[in-house]
Amino acid sequence: MTREYDAIVLGLGGIGSGTAYWLARSGAKVLGIERFELGHARGESHDHSRIIRLSYHAPNYVALAKEAYAAWGRLEADAAERVIFKTGGLDLGPRGGAIPLQGYADAMRACGVAFETLDAAQIRRRYPAMQIGDDVWGLFQADGGIVAAERATAAHQRAAKAFGATLLAQTAVATIDASGGEVEILAGGQRYRAGQLVIAAGPWSNAALAYAGLQLPLEITKEQAMYFRPAQPEPFEFGHFPVWIWMDDPSFYGFPVFGEAGLVKVTQDAGGRSVDPDLRGFEPDDEITARVRAFLSAHLPALAVEPSIVKTCLYTLTPDRDFVIDSLPGHPHVHVAIGAGHAFKFASVIGRILSELALHGSTPSDISAFGLGREILHMAAPPKQYMI
């Protein structure tokens, strides 16, 4: 027996769960398939927190971030649960650093986003735990904060099911046939058919795309988050300390106390080694740990202690670090999203966009920079630029 659906979603991490929710909310009959257990720690969407912010390097991202806040607000109303926690967000770094802060200021200004420009003395007065030189400056945006990652994904899944979606966990996909204007999938010994397919498989994207004859130049890296226990946690408590990003190479970012009692989360962005997602280990990366501890010794000395908790995750990186959100050439009923290691804050709005592509063939959101046709995705050895 073949079971029929309007749309099938492959992968139920942050983006896939968001897509299942928005499809079901729109009245579609939806099947979501996850090869592991729901909420697993093998991919990109687990742990307590991700940064959400309106500060971004280009106006299209700032505009999409505005839509992201609205999409999360809709989920919070439907799920009756808070998932966004505003703390204020601080982007800071040395003048002339590898990530130009001026571009962030220009993009926010172009999109009408209010922010403050702070010099080093102002940053030190506002956040005494930060030890920075006079060459450092920053941008503060009051709407920056935390999206509670595991909580948000579970809320998407719960709301999707409340709207009638069927979500299958620990169900391996054996075959995908996207020919003939529809999709037929064999998974867990059962055959399923749908008019639309959404691939939100993160590190396993190329395995799913192979059925449509497409492979992208993706790099899968093993990253890690570390939690540190300061002797005096008060300066880092929620409401007193912002989410922050150090805009240089290497780039680091961190949070106030959130999710783990008395612990402060800090890590490096895109600092991990390439791995096979099916073979990767879960052991800490001593090189990342050393780089983070050196940064903390220099700039947040109260956190320069042994990490109390180390968690690993994966990034699925495109060579230009831009998202992929598009329908497949020759397969207009198949849609894909790849988050490039910074998409969780956009998970709900990307889910909304994918649902619009699947149900209507278009979206009012500007995704013109995230297409599969861009040249860098078709190079044999594309240049890589992971600093954003």
Image (cartoon, grey):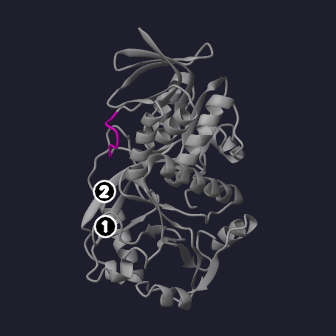
How many marks the image carries: the answer is 2
Label annotation for residue 227: 1
Residue 321: x percent and y percent? 57, 52
Looking at the image, residue 119 lies above or below residue 282: below
Residue 39 sits inside the magenta stretch: yes
Snapshot quadrant of residue 136: bottom right
Residue 39: x percent and y percent? 34, 43
Read off the residue under disc 2.
311
Q: Which residues are magenta?
A: 36-41
Q: Indicate the amino acid at tag 1.
A: Tyr
Q: Indicate the amino acid at tag 2.
A: Lys
Residue ID at (48%, 52%): 76
How far apart are the alpha carbons under marks 2 and 1?
9 Å
Who is closer to the viewer here, 157 or 209?
Answer: 157
Mark 2 or mark 1: which comes first in sequence?
1
Who is closer to the viewer here, 81 or 314?
Answer: 81
Label annotation for residue 301: none
Could you tell me if the residues under marks 2 and 1 are in contact, i.e. CB atoms within 8 Å? yes
232 sits to left or right of 159: left
Q: Quadrant of the N terminus?
A: top left
Dot 2 falls on a residue whose secondary structure is strand
- Mark 1 closeness class: few <14, some 14–19, many ≥20 residues within 10 Å: many
